[in-house]
Image (cartoon, rainbow, N blue to C red):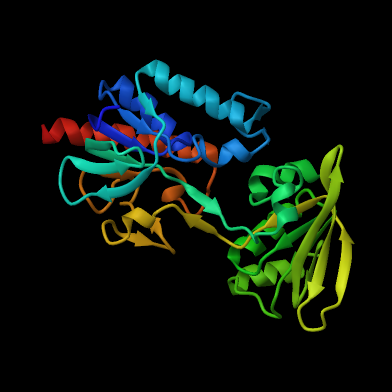
Amino acid sequence: MEKNIHSRLLIIGSGPAGYTAGVYGARAMLNPTLIQGIQPGGQLTITTEVENWPGMKEVQGPDLMIQMSEHAAAAGTNLISDHINKLDLSKRPFEALGDSGTLYTGDALILATGAQAKWLGLESENNFKGFGVSACATCDGFFYKGEEIIVVGGGNTAVEEALFLTKFASKVTLIHRRDTLKAEKILQQRLHKNEKISVRWFHELEEVIGTESPKGVSGVRIKNIKTGVKTTMSCKGVFIAIGHAPASELLSGQLDLHMGGYVATKADSTETSIPGVFAAGDLTDHIYRQAVTSAGMGCMAALEAEKFLSHSE
């Protein structure tokens, strides 16, 4: 294997943002190299039905990512299966060292490493991911029309998800370890006024209950952290809403970060605090976190990278 690979445009990350950046970068004749990372395709590879991708009434998440990767490759993007463990953004060309030992360099760099939902770490939670357990209400809420739903968390994300889910669910129960919420006051007011929502204070999720054939959630077991009393509740969906963690570990001290680790970009742009470095998708988006918005940012990043390269050359 080559130990040094140079590209005019280097893309790190392979979700909708990365693959879209690859398509647009290739069409701009930048001969982009895209490093796919540990989980090629990102979070959509662990998603089942996707019903909000324009032009497709329904598509499996892994299938959509395969189509996007094939599109990027057909357009001329050099896809490489490797994981970046070190970045040097102090000079151009920018340098990225892979687990394979290969050093990748790029005259412009697009970061699309995404973000991961935070999970509780329960074995049963992991078992039912994609089969009743989710971390995205806007992605999966539609599947629970008329059903009872559990939401776990107490911050803005949890309250916003609970409120959103009332559009579909017959009842939403919020599970929270404390007796007060961390969410903004206006969100708390809306939650308490909504007749579809009830709150279980001082409780934590202990186990997700369900069936294996067909696979699906049928309930949860929760525990009162003060009394230790355990309760079983029926539900069809469990939404874990305890926050997201952007994959920005390698960027700390090199790029401006905000909102708990998300890459800060200029207004209406994917430009970061370093000229020639662009960020797209969930790595920078702490608000929408949708496949379609990530793809849009990937397009923006590639167009801005092409403009940067043409001006710098």
Judged from this view, the residue extending furthest toward the top is 74
Judged from this view, the residue extending furthest toward the bottom is 226
Q: Position of residue 163 (x, y in %)?
A: 70, 59
Q: Position of residue 224 (x, y in %)?
A: 80, 77
The front one of 312 and 261 is 261
The front one of 303 and 245 is 245
Q: Quadrant of the N terminus?
A: top left
**For residue 66, side relative to residue 296 (left or right):** right
Looking at the image, can residue 194 be seen? yes
Judged from this view, the residue extending furthest toward the left is 313
Q: Which residue is drawn at the image coordinates 35% and 37% (left, top)?
A: 100
Q: Position of residue 112 (x, y in %)?
A: 40, 42
Image quadrant where residue 160 sits: bottom right
**For residue 10, side relative to residue 299 (left or right):** left
Q: Quadrant of the C terminus?
A: top left
Q: Which residue is drawn at the image coordinates 39% and 54% (left, top)?
A: 248
Q: Position of residue 192 (x, y in %)?
A: 74, 71
Rendered view: 272 above or below 11: below
Q: Which residue is drawn at the image coordinates 60% and 74% (left, top)?
A: 182
Image quadrant where residue 118 sits: bottom right
Rendered view: 251 above or below 280: below
Total count of labels: 0
**For residue 179, side relative to residue 6 (left or right):** right
Looking at the image, can residue 147 be seen? no
